[in-house]
Image: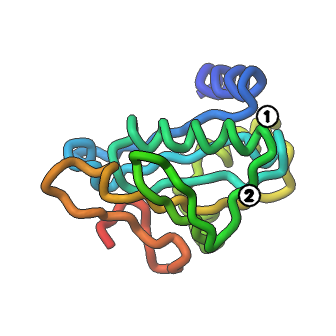
Amino acid sequence: MDDVIALDAAHIAEYGFAIQGVVPPGGADAGLGSWVYTVGLLDAVGHPEMIIAGGVPEQTGSVLSLLARSALAGERYRVDETIDLGEGGIARVGSVHEIQYELDTFNTWHNLKSAGVLHAPELDAVQITVSDAFFPPGTRSRQANLADPAARVHEEP
């Protein structure tokens, strides 16, 4: 775990953020139960961390990386806004219920905070809901609404 924390810390120091992807067993094939989120934006520029629940992690991670770089450059993504992703369609910015901060949803953020890598006083995040273009053909969009206290990133809504 110390090596993982050191690698994440180095990545955040160099780029201002890291992208954490989580793929539970059996979830990778259809993008089910997977999620990706940023770590470090709160410290770097005071922007809430961003999370995409569902989708194919390689694709959704690329979207978050793009959005995180723009946040570092001064862009701010606020709840109820929409984001034009070009050919990826439109994304929506939503709130994240605080119960998600207490679950395993943001484990890497909490591990880095405990290790003294992150210094933000508390976690704050927004959910980016992407279009069906980020899901494998033939599957429907399965993105948990993290504003709902009963929602879980690893369960189908």
Q: Name the residue under label 1.
A: 117
Q: In which quarter of the image is residue 118?
A: top right
Graded by Cα atoms within 10 Å as few (under 14), some (14 to 19) or many (20 or more), the crowding at tag 2 reads: some
- Which SS class for mark 1? loop
Residue at 67% from the left image edge and 23% from the top image edge: 11
Graded by Cα atoms within 10 Å as few (under 14), some (14 to 19) or many (20 or more), the crowding at tag 1 reads: many
| Residue 3, position as x, y percentages in the image | 61, 20
Question: CB of mark 1 within 8 Å of CB of mark 2?
Answer: no
- Which SS class for mark 2? loop
Judging from the image, the colouring scheme is: rainbow
Residue at 69% from the left image edge and 41% from the top image edge: 70
Q: Which image quarter holds the N terminus?
A: top right
Asked if 116 appears above or below 91 in the picture, the reply is above
- Label located before the other in sequence (1 or 2): 1
Residue at 33% from the left image edge and 73% from the top image edge: 157
| Residue 64, position as x, y percentages in the image | 55, 43
Indicate the amino acid at tag 2: Leu
Residue farthest to the left, as pictured:
138
| Residue 106, position as x, y percentages in the image | 58, 52
User: In this view of the protein, which residue sits in the foreground, 11 or 118?
Assistant: 11
User: In this view of the protein, which residue sits in the foreground, 77 or 28?
Assistant: 77
Asked if 134 appears above or below 15 in the picture, the reply is below
Q: Quadrant of residue 132?
A: bottom left
Residue at 69% from the left image edge and 58% from the top image edge: 77
The numbered dot on residue 125 is: none
**For the residues marked 1 and 2, what is the alpha-carbon distance in whole angstroms?**
14 Å
Indicate the amino acid at tag 1: Val
Asked if 30 appears above or below 144 in the picture, the reply is above
Q: Mark 2 points at which residue?
A: 123
User: In this view of the protein, which residue sits in the foreground, 48 or 85?
Assistant: 85
Is residue 142 rendered to the left or right of residue 136?
A: right
